[in-house]
Amino acid sequence: MSHRLQNCKITPYYRNLLDSLGPDHPLRRTVEPLDDCLPMPGELADPLGEEVHSPVPGLVHTYPDKVLLFATLDCAVHCRYCTRGRLVGKSSKGWKLSNEVFQYLETHAEIRDVLVSGGDPLTLSDNELDELLCNVRKIKHIRTIRLGSKVPAVLPSRITPELAAILAKHRVWLQLHFIHPAELTKEMTLACDTLAEAGVPMVSQTVLLKGINDDTDTLAELFYGLLERRVKPYYLFQCDPVVGSSSFRTSVEKGLQIMRELQGRISGLAMPTFAIDAPGGGGKISLLPNSQFRREGNEIVLTNYEGKEYRYPDPE
């Protein structure tokens, strides 16, 4: 069994949603333990090479001008395809963000953008989150703060006017995680309304998942639904090759086919960018339906922004 399934966690709200959808709804596979997670060639515990790009604990510095900051290792829901399954849920074992993180940010003036992630930063208390954002915002050369969260999809009651005011005060961009139109409930809509009306800008990131959202109708409904709730579809990600994720991964060509079909069906404003986060830490590589890439056996060879080549496992 994958190490990720040992940390299985589902909020009561999301459990009730799954129960209302019925026992065979594909969303269940994303959070419930199943015997379909045997390791496959090319899969890695740390597929994005975050640990080798971590100059201090709690910080990943892959791109020249932006960093990833782990606010917490706790999460409201443990997704089976999570890139950070090796870490998520371990905050109770004493993990804490250190002062080294802020010292590093202070001394690296090239850093302009900080993505606060984890785990899920919105599992922190209002006071903890406000303090963290204050510490980041007071560093003068940092121009943008982004915060990644799945909370509006799985714990929408956490989104209060008080929380929205904190995010607005620090001029935070929210990067939210949605994977299926069934997540667009009245509770989620209220959460997004609360954020939007407080002036918090929102974009979404969706992972392409085999048998769950890998068809044009499902994604078109999701992306239009997000746009109606004032959330801009931002990225559609090819699933990262984390250990035990093979049952979730489509072929790269499948993703390109869906993008071709979406181009003729939905508004450009509802269209995300299809991308692969290059295994090993090469960063995000965007793919268009007419993208040229090289196949070598069961791998796709990709070139990142630095001209370096990275390989994504993609069995024929």
Image (cartoon, helix red, strand yellow):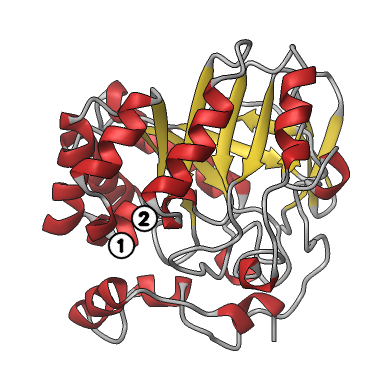
Please give the residue where the numbered disc 1 appears in the rendered image.
Answer: 155
Which x, y percent locates residue 312? 76, 47
Q: Quadrant of residue 205?
A: top left
Q: Amino acid at mark 2?
A: Val
Q: Residues within 10 Å of mark 1 (few under 14, many from 20)?
A: many
- As helix, strand or loop, the secondary structure at mark 2 comes to helix
Reply above or below: 18 against 107: below
Q: Quadrant of the C terminus?
A: bottom right
Q: Nearer the viewer, residue 189 or 143?
A: 143
Residue at the (24%, 42%) spot, across then down? 162
- Quarter in which the N terminus is drawn: bottom right
Q: Residue 252: where, in percent of width, then height?
A: 61, 46
Residue 234 screen position, x and y as percent: 42, 32
Q: Residues within 10 Å of mark 2 (few under 14, many from 20)?
A: many
For badge 1, the amino acid type reads Leu
Q: Is residue 50 above or below residue 38?
A: above
Q: Which residue is mark 2?
A: 151
Examine the rendering and report whether any part of residue 177 can be seen: no
In-image side of 155 versus 177 (left or right):
left
Contact between labelled residues 2 and 1, with CB atoms less than 8 Å apart: yes
Residue drawn at x 82%, y 41% is 56
Task: Tell me the SS state at disc 1.
Answer: loop
Residue at x 86%, y 31% (from the top left corner): 309
